[in-house]
Image (spheres, rainbow, N blue to C red):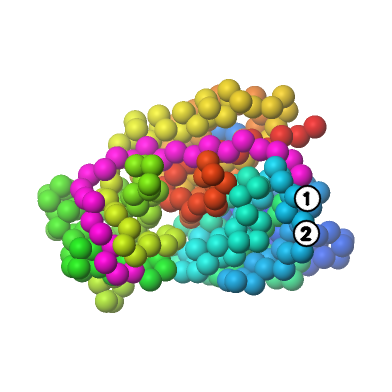
Amino acid sequence: MLLVGEKSSLEVEELINYLNNKNIKFFGGIYPRLLIEKKSCSKGFIIEKFEPIYSAMVLPFLMRFKLDLSSIEGCTAFILVDGLSSRMKDLTNTVYEKLGPGVNYVGGGAGYYDMKQRPCIFDNRGIYKDVLYVCVVKNKSNVAVKHGWNKLEGPFEVAASRDNVLTKLDSYSAFEVYRDVIEDHEHIRLLKGDFFIYAKDHPFGILQSNGEVIVRDPIRVNENDEIICVADIPVNSQLYVLEGNPNTLLNSSIQIAEHCASIAPKKYVPFLFDCISRAMFLEERFDEEISNIQSKLAFKVKGALSIGEISSRNDGKLIIHNKSTILGLLEIE
């Protein structure tokens, strides 16, 4: 598995040719920044060697899988997916329908800092967009996720949406509802051109049956005044506008590191997927977040700033998060 910093993306095609000439099977993704120990960088490579039970490039509703599910029970499934694909939910559903709740999912959405979609997932055959790569390894893992965002306004009912496009809240234009909330609380005038400046501070939260919210990242407004998000917004769901502050976000990441450390195996590799817009929100304090996480762990953290984070829920279901921190400890011998 190769995680590539976006400033090294021009080297990926050469890397593909080199590894193919060596008959090495590989997969990877291009990410805005890589996370290594207490640092982040936009250039370079993280390489991790696995002995997979199963690995495949996945298209929406197209995944060849013929193994007995009992053979992957308790294993870990690494998920690298195009974080800006409107089909991200279809891609993760395709994986979950094949692999089910018996594996532990961990991973993150690939892409570029400027949030413009282009090919970012690669394997021996080339580099692609609108795809997902799954790699199942025999190792057990412990995975934790938190976000630290709080409810500001809502709930609003999602009256109309399609995939990652939010159209109506409470039968009103989604942008108009969101604009009114932001202008009221921020005391500014929200224009389309400035949308992400304020949207990165005020994501959406989709209410779950347990009372918690899964965060969705609004990234832009289209020509129809619809809000484009990272990952799906289900119709008829209850949605909040959220707010946060650096301390609540930093505390949430400390909590997952402490939790994982308390149940950690004797030897492990920590994989961290932390949301790119979370880093934008924390600004210079983001280094504090990854330093806090590393300080709680005995082994070197590896990972990336992601556009969407992937983890298992307590019942085993594969969930897409935004603006969240996901930490997975992969047990090794």
Amino acid type, mark 1? Ser
| Of the pair 301 and 74, the residue shown nearer to us | 74
Please indicate whether residue 238 sits to the left or right of residue 324 in the image.
Answer: left
Identify the residue at image location x=72%, y=24%.
Answer: 266
Residue hosting label 1: 71
| Of the pair 294 and 77, the residue shown nearer to us | 77
Question: Measured from the top left, where is residue 115 in percent x and y?
Answer: 44, 62
The secondary element bearing badge 1 is classed as: helix
The residues tagged by marks 2 and 1 sit, at their Cα atoms, a distance apart of: 7 Å
Identify the residue at image location x=73%, y=28%.
Answer: 267
Residue hosting label 2: 67
Give the dominant element type of the magenta stretch: helix, strand or loop: strand
Quarter of the image for the C terminus: give it: top right
The secondary element bearing badge 2 is classed as: loop
Residue 98 in view (yes/no): yes
Question: Measured from the top left, where is residue 282 in percent x and y?
Answer: 37, 40
Amino acid type, mark 2? Leu
Give the residues in magenta: 137-161
Magenta stretch containing residue 145, yes or no? yes
